[in-house]
């Protein structure tokens, strides 16, 4: 990149540095994942502010110490997310997963920003589950829930699946390496498959009972924890009991 850069982006991480500045991580389909400093972000009323989860067209400038924020045309601030603990926790998990994937593919950007929007109007457990299912699918980490990603055998209709953390996928009974302690029953597997096929917008309107929604939510969080140990701070130090 040149000394200046401009592009669509969203703030996915924000932390205080020094007395008045903030270090922001931007997720941008055109600029990638990029750390920038927002000088005076905590002091001056005149300085450009970009709170966490602000989406917009960012203008950046490269100085001796790296990229800094020059200007921003705000598209959305996602303010409601910051006001609710569960929504904050959900968004933090989305950011953790993007940082884990270390990619800024346009499909992942669309999933991330649309999921933040969805958090403001749908139950958070539903949105989080759909995000994880589609994230794993985009990153090639889930298989298709029709055949075992480990041995290639087609699953039976009534088959209960186990898990293989080293591949981070649900597998058949024979390929399971967790003594069937993380199981996926047939009806839940069907739901995961349907979400994977439908995409975010349609999946948000799937009818599912709150109990089933909660079971799938917990299942997916546990899958992430055993697949990516010590890499998802939002889950390991977060408020959800998993
Ligand atoms: Zn298998």
Image (cartoon, grey):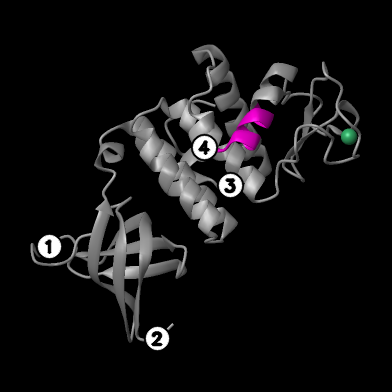
Magenta segment = 192-200
Query: What is the CA distance from the residue labelled 3 to the residue labelled 1?
Result: 34 Å
Q: Secondary structure at mark 4?
A: helix
Query: What is the CA distance from the residue labelled 2 to the residue labelled 3?
Result: 36 Å
Q: Secondary structure at mark 3?
A: loop
Image location (x, y in percent) of residue 128: 49, 34
Which mark identifies residue 68? none
Circle 1 residues within 10 Å: few <14, some 14–19, many ≥20: few
- The secondary structure that dominates the magenta segment is helix
Query: What is the CA distance from the residue labelled 2 to the residue labelled 4?
Result: 35 Å
Q: Residue at x 47, y 27 (%)?
A: 125
Which mark identifies residue 2? 2
Label 4 or label 3, whichever lies nearer to me, is 4
Image location (x, y in percent) of residue 16: 28, 59
Which of marks 1 and 2 precedes in the sequence?
2
Q: Are marks 2 and 1 in contact (CB under 8 Å)?
A: no
Label 2 or label 1, whichever lies nearer to me, is 2
Q: Quadrant of the N terminus?
A: bottom left
Q: Reply above or below: 20 against 125.
A: below
Circle 2 residues within 10 Å: few <14, some 14–19, many ≥20: few
Q: Which residue is mark 1?
A: 43
């Amino acid at each position: 990149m040149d000394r200046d850069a401009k592009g669509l982006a969203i703030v996915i991480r924000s932390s205080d540095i020094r007395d008045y500045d903030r270090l922001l991580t931007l997720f941008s389909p055109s600029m990638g994942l990029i750390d920038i400093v927002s000088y005076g972000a905590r002091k001056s009323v005149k300085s450009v502010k970009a709170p966490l989860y602000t989406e917009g067209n960012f203008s950046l400038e490269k100085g001796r110490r790296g990229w800094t924020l020059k200007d921003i045309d705000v598209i959305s601030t996602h303010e409601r997310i910051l006001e609710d603990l569960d929504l904050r926790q959900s968004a933090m998990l989305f950011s953790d997963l993007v940082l884990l994937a270390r990619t800024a593919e346009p499909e992942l950007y669309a999933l991330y920003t649309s999921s933040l929007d969805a958090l403001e109007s749908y139950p958070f457990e539903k949105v989080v589950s759909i995000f994880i299912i589609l994230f794993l699918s985009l990153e090639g980490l889930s298989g298709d829930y029709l055949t075992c990603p480990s041995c290639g055998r087609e699953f039976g209709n009534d088959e209960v699946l186990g898990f293989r953390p080293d591949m981070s996928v649900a597998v058949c009974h024979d390929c399971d390496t967790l003594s069937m302690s993380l199981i996926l029953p047939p009806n839940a597997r069907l739901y995961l498959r349907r979400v994977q096929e439908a995409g975010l917008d349609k999946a948000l309107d799937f009818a599912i009972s709150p109990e089933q929604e909660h079971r799938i939510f917990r299942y997916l969080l546990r899958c992430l924890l055993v697949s990516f140990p010590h890499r998802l701070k939002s889950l390991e130090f977060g408020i959800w009991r998993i």
